[in-house]
């Protein structure tokens, strides 16, 4: 009954910014996360935010460039990506879990979106 829908991906140049959105429907979810996967690569943790939005965690590869936030009224989370690099190119996935605390492992999440493509040219 839970559905996650990502949007906001696209083709940009290195140094540009994008904002990804993830809208959840079906029921209220707690901890949310973003992962990405490039062709031939493992799914990589990007960021996670707890149930209240008071705690966020970022991977070293995006820390200082990406910002995760949530809007409870809209049941939506946002990933603001600044200073994009070609190595950021991947399909970005939104994930959700009933857990209250932040999670960095894919198997700790129960629900996944279909993904949105982000391509960064040099």
Image (cartoon, rainbow, N blue to C red):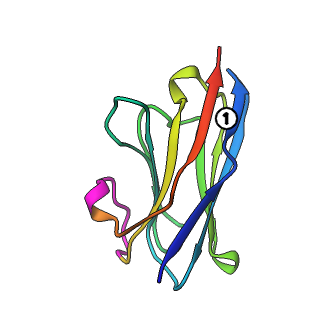
Magenta residues, as a range? 99-107
Residue 35 position, x and y percent, is 44, 48
Residue 29 versus residue 69 in the image, above or below: below
SS of the residue under disc 1: loop
Compare residues 78 and 55 and report the one nearer the observer.
Answer: 78
**Residue behind mark 1:** 82
Q: Please name the residue shown 63% across and 75% down the image.
A: 75
Left or right position of 3 against 73: left
Does 73 lie within the magenta span? no
Residue 84 position, x and y percent, is 63, 28
For the stretch drawn in magenta, the main secondary structure is: loop
Q: Going by the picture, which residue comes out furthest to the top?
A: 122
Residue 113 versus residue 47 in the image, above or below: below
Residue 56 versus residue 63 in the image, above or below: below
Count of numbered badges drawn on the protein: 1
Label 1: few (<14), some or many (≥20) within 10 Å? some
Q: Please name the residue shown 70% across and 31% down the image.
A: 11
Q: Please name the residue shown 69% across and 38% down the image.
A: 10
Q: Please name the residue shown 63% across and 77% down the image.
A: 72
Residue 13 position, x and y percent, is 72, 22
Q: Quadrant of residue 25?
A: bottom right
Left or right position of 3 against 77: left
Q: Quadrant of the C terminus?
A: top right
Residue 20 position, x and y percent, is 65, 50
């Amino acid at each position: 009954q839970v559905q996650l829908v990502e949007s906001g991906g696209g083709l940009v140049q290195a140094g540009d910014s994008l904002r990804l959105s993830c809208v959840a429907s079906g029921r209220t979810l707690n901890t949310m996360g973003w992962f990405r996967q490039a062709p031939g690569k493992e799914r990589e943790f990007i960021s996670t935010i707890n149930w209240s939005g008071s705690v966020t965690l970022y991977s070293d590869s995006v820390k200082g460039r990406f910002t995760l936030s949530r809007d409870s009224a809209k049941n939506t989370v946002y990933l603001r990506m600044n200073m994009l690099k070609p190595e950021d190119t991947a399909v970005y996935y939104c994930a959700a879990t009933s857990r209250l605390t932040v999670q960095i492992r894919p198997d700790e999440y129960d629900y996944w979106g279909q993904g949105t493509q982000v391509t960064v040219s040099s």
